[in-house]
Amino acid sequence: MSTTTAPDTTRSGDPGDRDRPGAPAAAGDPTGAAPPATAPGRPRYPRGTRVLLLLAVFVCAACGLVYELALTALGSYLIGNSVMQTSVVISVMVFAMGIGSLAAKPLQRRAVGAFALVELLLGLVGGLSVLLLYVAFSWLRIYMPAMVVACFVVGLLIGAEIPLLMTLLQRIRRQEAGSAVADMFAADYVGALIGGLCFPLLLLPAFGQLKGALVVGAVNAVAGGGVVLWIFRRETRRMVRAGLLGGVAAVLAVLATVYALADDIEVTARQQLYRDPIVHAETTPYQDIVVTRSTAFTGAPDTRLFLNGDLQFSSVDEYRYHEALVHPALAGKRSSVLVLGGGDALALREVLRYDDVEKVTLVDLDPAMTRLARSFGPLVELNGQALADPRVTAVNADAFTWLRDAGQRYDAVVIDFPDPDTAALAKLYSVEFYHLLTHVLKPESRVVVQAGSPFFAPKSYWSIARTVREAGYGTTAYQVDVPSFGNWGFVLAAPGRGGGAPPLRLAADAPRLRFLDDAVLKASTVFPVDRRPQDVRASTLMDPAVLEYTRHEWQNY
C-alpha cells in the first residue's frame, strides 16, 4: 500500500552508518567527500538481493491495497452507501498510515526484526479483518465502530512498512535520497496496481471475500516476514530469527485453520441476519445473493430472495408485485419487450404469458443471478423456466452502458431495478438514463418503472416520478399493497409529453390474473393525503437526489 509520508533516508538505524559508503560527512569535514567504496565490517550481499527486497515491497503493497478494497466492498455489501463506506475506509487508513510512519522511526535501529513483526501482524489482522467484521455485523451489531478500528490498525501497520523498508534498502546499498525514494515508490505503486486488479478479477471470483482476505494475509506473512528474514539471516541473531520464523509458521497455521472453517463460520454468521433457513448464498463481484426458504407444515414454503440484505421478493405474494409491474405496460403493442433488471425472471414470467410476444430481451448485470434463475430449483419453479423460453435473449451487462449501444427498438419496457440506495443504482434512476431509454422506444411504446414505496419513502418515490417526467415522458403514478413489502409504487410512462399521462389499464386479452383487475388499477391511482406528490428534485448523474432521499427515508425502517 502506498503512502504519502516521505521516508527518512538520512540514517540506516545502525550506529556504524558514519563509516558506510554514501553516509553523510562527519561533522567538521570541509570536503564532504564520501568514504571509501567499501567500509570495514559492512556485510556483502549476493547480487540480486536488492531486487528481491523490492519484490517484497511490491507484494506487500499489493496486499495492502487488497485489504483496503476488501473492507470497502464489505461495507458496501452490508451497509450500502458505497460512497460513505469508501470515504471512511480510505480516510481512516491514510490517517493511520501517517501515524504508523512516525511510529516506525524508533524501530529503524532494529529494522529487520521490526519489519518482519509488522508484516506478521499485518498478515494476521488483514487476513482476518473481513471475517471478524462480518461476525461483528451479524452477531454484535457494531459494524461501524469495528470497521474504524480495523481500518486504523491495518493502516497503522501499512504505514510502518515504508520507513523500515527504506532502512533495509539503504543497508544493502546506500543511495541518494531521491533515487531511493523513486525505487521504493515505484515498487510500491506498481504493487498497488496489481493488487487492485487482482481483487475483482482473481480473488473475488476464485475465493470470495472471506477466503480471499485469508489468502492475501498468508502471502503477506510469507513475503514480508519470510523473505526479509532470508535476506538478512546472517545479520539476525539466531534466537530472533527462530522466534520470527516461528511467528510466520504460527500466522500461517491460524490463517489456514480459519480458511478451513471459513464456510461454516460464514454460514453461521449469515444465518443470524435472516429469519428463515438459508438455502443458497453466494457473493459475486456485484452483490451478495441470499435465498431463504421457510419450513411450512401447511401450505407452500416461503422462498425469499435478498440482494445485499434487501428483500427482493417473497414467494407468498410476489405475484402481486409482478402483476402490477408488468401488465399495465403490456396493455398496448407488445411484440417486442425489453426487461431491464429482474434477473430472477419473475417479471419475465409475466411477460411470456402473452402469446403475441415475439421477442424479449432481458438485461441484468450479474450473470450469477441469471444463472441461479435458470438452475436453482425453487427459483425455476417460481419463474416457470422463463429463461429457457426460445423467445428470450438474456444479456449480462450494465443497463446504462447497454442502452448506449443498443440498436433495436421495443414496444414495451419493464424496468425492475433494486431501490436506488447506492451510487451505482442511482444512475439507473437519472434523467440521463431515461433519455438514453428513448433511443430504444417506438413512438407508441409504454414503459413501467418500479419506484419504491410511496409510504415508507415518499420523497424517493415522487423524485423518481419527477425524474421520468423531466426526461420528456408523460407519466401515471400508481401503488398497490404487497404484504411482504408494504405499500409499493410504480410509474407508467410514455415517450413525449404531448401524449399526456398514459392510461392505466389491462389489455382486453390479458391472461387471468390472481391479484390485478381494472378495479384494482383504478383504485391504485388514488394516493392518501399524506402521500400525494411532494416538492422534490429530479435526479441526475451530477445531482443524484434520489440517492439522498432513499438513504434518509429508509434508515428509519
Image: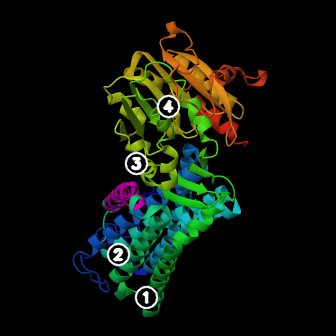
Tag 4–tag 3 contact (CB < 8 Å): no
Amino acid at circle 1: Arg
Percent across and percent down for residue 87 are 55, 47
Foreground mark, 1 or 3? 3
The residue at 59%/62% (across/down) is: 134
The span shown in magenta is: 182-204
The reply to whether the magenta stretch includes residue 431 is: no
As drawn, 466 above or below 64: above
Amino acid at circle 3: Pro
- The residue wearing badge 3 is 367
Amino acid at circle 4: Ile
The residue at 35%/78% (across/down) is: 227
Which of the two residues, 274 or 515, is positioned nearer the viewer here? 515
Percent across and percent down for residue 525 are 67, 20
As drawn, 324 above or below 503: below
Amino acid at circle 2: Arg
> In the shown orientation, is residue 99 left or right of residue 551?
left
Q: Secondary structure at mark 3?
A: helix
Foreground mark, 2 or 1? 1
The N terminus sits in image quarter: bottom left
Which residue ends up furthest to the right in the rendered image? 529
The reply to whether the magenta stretch includes residue 199 is: yes
Q: Quadrant of residue 338?
A: top left
If you read the primary sequence from the N terminus, does the residue marked by circle 4 or circle 3 appear first?
3
Foreground mark, 2 or 4? 4
Is residue 27 something one can see in this rendering? no
The C terminus sits in image quarter: top right
- Are there few (<14), some (14-19), or many (20+) residues within 10 Å of tag 1? many
> In the shown orientation, is residue 483 left or right of residue 467?
right
Considering the whole magenta stretch, tell me its main secondary structure.
helix
Percent across and percent down for residue 539 are 55, 26
- Are there few (<14), some (14-19), or many (20+) residues within 10 Å of tag 3? some
